[in-house]
Image (tube, grey):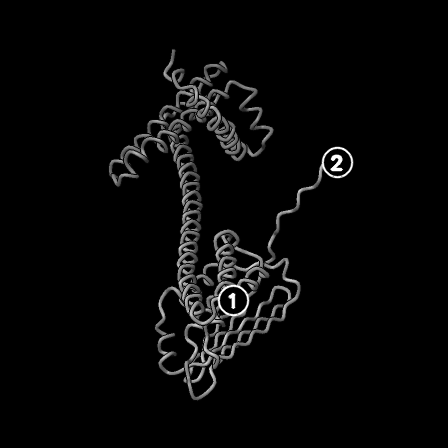
Amino acid sequence: MNALSYYPSAQNWLIRNKLYHIPFWGLYHFIWWTVALGNPAKAFASIFLSPFILKFLFYVVFQALAVYFNLYYLIPKYLEKGRFTHYMIALLLTITAASLLIIPGYYLSAFMSGQTMQQAYGANGDCFYGYLGTSLPSTLAAMTLAMSIKLGKNWLQTQRKQQVLEKEKLETELNFLKHQFNPHFLFNTINSIFFLIHKNPDMASASLAKFSELLRYQLYECNDRQILLSKEISYMENSIELEKLRQNDNVSVSLRIDQENSSQWGIAPFILMTFVENAFKHVSKHTDRPNWIRIQLDQEHEQLNFSVSNSASDVVNNDIVHYGGIGLKNVQRRLDLIYPGQYCLDIQHNSNSFDVRLQLRLTALELPQPMQKIA
């Protein structure tokens, strides 16, 4: 019983993953014979219809052994550990040994064909160094080809792994940024209801019902990376209604929405609402002149134009500019990650107003198809 019989899975793996190498090396050497003889039919006859197949097999077997010894033993043991001198010495010895082991194939082929070395290989057929001068470059070429393939394969695997890790990193960062926003908005909404309790208990009760709808949206309906635009707009409208209830009478809020059928268009959750929430947070508190918030959304096909403006004062503007990572910096980072090259964001602030304009290219959202009723 051999060692592999204790490990049937290892044996199956070896058969499954290495058997296809045999025809590869056979084809590789057949191509070289074709180049040397100038004719594939002549090369086929010289290899498979004569005793010189033994010389061919010596090339295939010993060069393949040298290649795999280098790839699976020398490289991991020496090259990958930075032992370059040891690796180069071992590699040269391997190439030399494989080249020398190929040479008996010349003599054995001549013997099996019943010819002398001169009859089989010409006037200089007995020259040992002549055979070494052929087998050595051939072995070196095979080793170089195999290393190139192996290193190229490793590079591709590393690139794929790097892409997967980068994608996972971006998804993790997106989830973190999105959940970082949610508590901030919830705290503001709770404060709105708190103010309403003192002003109008009945309104506070109705607002609490709206608030429960918002919570349901955040907890159950916006966990995907993309949601329906119509749901985001509905969420924004409900949130604005809650925000308006706690504002003073001297704050004028206008909302204009002009859109086509948005049933097929998707958007990242909380993108739009961030700007609206920021406007309510930083709207001016003037007593001698109007305070206002203007929100406008236009959508035609995949093009979305969204603008939010609010009256502001110098103090408020300064607060907005230095506003931290939960607000504007958050949404800008999310836009960079989710819509690279697909959006244009313009933020302007002066002594009287703060203006945000977002142009965004939407993507169609694939909705699950309803289950067909079985007849």
**What residue do we see at 42% from left, 63% from top?**
190
Disc 1 target residue = 343
Residue drawn at x 49%, y 57% as measured from the top left: 212
Is residue 341 found left or right of 372 in the rendered image? Answer: left
Q: Which quarter of the figure has residue 281?
A: bottom left
Q: Earlier in the sequence, mark 2 or mark 1?
A: 1
* Marks 2 and 1, how far apart at CA: 47 Å
Q: Residue at x 50, y 64 (%)?
A: 207
Q: Is residue 20 above or below residue 179?
A: above
Q: Position of residue 118 (x, y in %)?
A: 45, 21
Residue 183, image x, y percentages:
40, 59
Residue kind at label 1, given as amino acid type: Tyr
Q: Give the SS element for disc 1.
A: strand
Between 74 and 34, the residue placed more toward the observer is 74
| Residue 232: % across, % down | 55, 61
Horizontal side, residue 51 vs residue 8: left or right: right
**Residue 306 versus residue 263 in the image, above or below:** below
Q: Which mark is residue 375?
A: 2
